[in-house]
Image (cartoon, grey):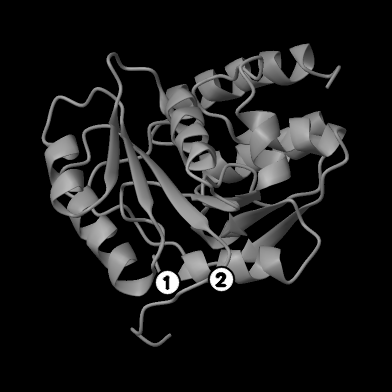
Amino acid sequence: MSMCKKFSTTKVFIVIPAYNEDHTIGDLVCELHALYDYPVVVVNDNSIDCTSIEARKAGAYVLDMPVHLGAWCCMQAGMSFSVDHGADLIVTMDADGQHHPCDVDVLVQSILSSSADMVIGSCVRRGSAARKLAWTYFRKLGKIKYADVTSGFRVYNLKATKIVIDKNFALLDHQDMGVIMALDAKGLQIIEQDVEMQCRICGKSRVFSSWPKTLGYMIATTLFVVSKRHY
């Protein structure tokens, strides 16, 4: 991809929840601004490091949460801010450096060239044994067809966004399955777009870093999925 900055008549916002990510967030925001003319919204989840300072220095809009709320509440806050500021499409991505900034445009072009309401940036090659077990289990439990159900690298149109930012749309900290099930149940179209992902620059997965954590995530999400079958 050319390093020329991409401009679009469609107003795209990029939302990044971040908790203690001062080692990666500044470089990530700078890379995104070098590639695109898209506002970047970093939602600082009451970090105890310099995440907020580094994100502001790099030119992001920064929303500082007063207490530690978790990934999903931060995502809702960032998406709501983006809608209030005129967003047509919202890209969500992680702050830890595993998502390639150049693939933002891949997801945006995928949703613009299709009738999809949400596009999942899918990378099944990254799956550890624990992650692949969770994917298989959740596909069967939720009766869904998507390969990478835990990717946070996604793009939403305004219709999908308004559903998931509704004040009554409460989810667990890790929102992946809940969002898919809710949009699926409301008849919205979801597609997957193959992307590359890399290992985190530092740190480790908060869900799939150990079998006990993976098991706890699977139990909690199972209870959530079962309780939300009425969507």
**Spot occupied by residue 186 in the image (x, y as percentages of width and height):** 85, 34
Which mark, residue 106? 2
Location of residue 15 by image quarter? top left
Can residue 110 be seen here? The reply is: yes
Location of residue 81 by image quarter? top left
Is residue 103 left or right of 224 when viewed as pictured? Answer: left
Residue name at image x 34 percent, y 57 percent: 199
Observer-nearest residue: 193 or 105? Answer: 105
Residue name at image x 60 percent, y 58 percent: 122
Q: Is residue 132 above or below residue 17?
A: below
Can residue 143 be seen here? The reply is: no
Q: Amino acid at mark 1?
A: Cys
Check contact, mark 2 vs mark 1: CB within 8 A.
yes
| Quarter of the C terminus within the rendering | top right
Is residue 85 left or right of 36 when viewed as pictured? Answer: right
Residue named by callout 1: 102
Mark 2 to mark 1 CA distance (whole Å): 7 Å
